[in-house]
Amino acid sequence: MEQSFQQVIRNRRSVRKFEPGNAVGREVLERIVDCGRWAPSGANAQCFEFIVVDTPDLRNQVTEVFLRQAQRLVDHAKGFPAVKKTYLANTVAIVIVLGDPRWKVCFPQPTTDGWEAEYRDNNEAIFLCSLGAAIQNIQLGVAAEGLTSAWLSGGGEDITNKELADLLGYPEWMKAYGTIPIGIPAATQDRRYRRPLAQCLHWNGYNPAQFRTHEQVDFFESTLRPFAMYRDRENFQDWEDRTEKLGEWDAAFTSATPNPSGKLQPEADFSAPRTLGQATKRRQKD
Ligand SMILES: Cc1cc2nc3c(=O)[nH]c(=O)nc-3n(C[C@H](O)[C@H](O)[C@H](O)COP(=O)(O)O)c2cc1C
């Protein structure tokens, strides 16, 4: 089925359940990876490598790595919705996108004392954004082939990356920034929560009435997040339990202006969750 570009964008969904027992030809996988090759990258440095795992034995070993990664997440990173990674065993292939940090040397470097902060962070951002563009292109390539994928960032954690490097033979100082399991979806998931366009689109300058307050971020993180991540609905208006789930935050999430007063808040520390809610009740127990 021929899909328009807009349809490919919308059909790209993170699917975590695949039909077992399928295979696709290498020409399909090559077309998918070629989409990653054509991604933009800072200084055209192409700071990526793509490892495609399409043999059942190796795929099962990669799956084992991610089962251990998922268990570590459960044991040591409470509060994050943990997804069973057993579905990786039902993939037709797993693409691992490595970032090669040596290429950061091509991005702007501070040459004058006192300019490290200006350029060092941005150097890292260029590196990560280049990898993100490649990973996204691959995911769109997957969707264009009528297949589905998800983006697993867990491969980039040090322990998991070490296990993947040992298994796949790449230098440990390269990192798996994106692991992309590819498969035939076991269920249609063609919708996912998205903010209303009018809420995130600012015409000709930032509109303070569209600012999401610190408390709104807290509510999403602590309470709404797992539903927003996994439910098969684009709009909260379509949730049968909208009132129960959103409560007093309904207008903030569904209207064009979450912050009608237009009052902005100063920067605050969001390096750790600030409130406890339904999504974080695991933390509460400990
Ligand atoms: C940088 C990044 C890291 C992600 N890491 C994971 C991950 O480790 N595990 C996972 O199941 N999904 C991961 N995702 C997928 C997101 O959860 C997903 O894109 C989001 O919930 C929206 O759903 P959608 O992709 O179906 O639209 C990641 C996405 C991005 C962009």
Image (spheres, rainbow, N blue to C red):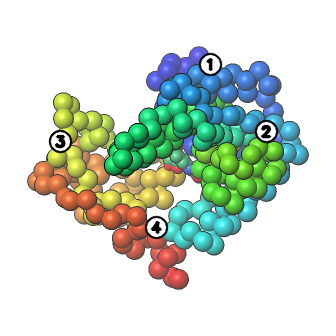
Which element type, helix, strand or loop, lies under badge 3? loop
Which element type, helix, strand or loop, lies under badge 2? strand
Q: Nearer the viewer, mark 2 or mark 1?
A: 2
Q: CA distance from mark 1 to mark 3?
A: 40 Å
Amino acid type, callout 1: Met
Amino acid type, callout 2: Val
Mark 1 or mark 2, which is nearer the start of the sequence?
1
Q: Residues within 10 Å of mark 1 (few under 14, many from 20)?
A: few
Q: Residues within 10 Å of mark 3 (few under 14, many from 20)?
A: some
- Decide: is 267 above or below 102: below
- Decide: is 248 above or below 15: below
Q: Residues within 10 Å of mark 2 (few under 14, many from 20)?
A: some
Q: Locate residue 73 relative to residue 67 in the image: left or right.
A: left
Which residue is under mark 1? 1
Q: Locate residue 147 relative to residue 165 in the image: left or right.
A: left
Mark 4 or mark 1, which is nearer the start of the sequence?
1
Amino acid type, callout 4: Ala
Q: Quadrant of the N terminus?
A: top right
Q: Nearer the viewer, residue 172 or 220?
A: 172
The answer to whether residue 184 is visible is no
Check residue 53 in the rendering and tell me which mark sits there, or answer none: 2
Which residue is under mark 3? 207
Which residue is under mark 4? 279
Q: Quadrant of residue 264?
A: bottom left
Expressed as whole percent of the image width and height from the top left, the position of residue 17 reads 67, 47
| Residue drawn at point x = 40 percent, y = 52 percent | 239
Q: Are marks 3 and 2 in contact (CB under 8 Å)?
A: no
Q: Locate residue 114 relative to residue 46 in the image: left or right.
A: left
Mark 2 or mark 4, which is nearer the start of the sequence?
2
Which element type, helix, strand or loop, lies under badge 1? loop
Q: Nearer the viewer, mark 4 or mark 2?
A: 2
Expressed as whole percent of the image width and height from the top left, the position of residue 164 reads 75, 51
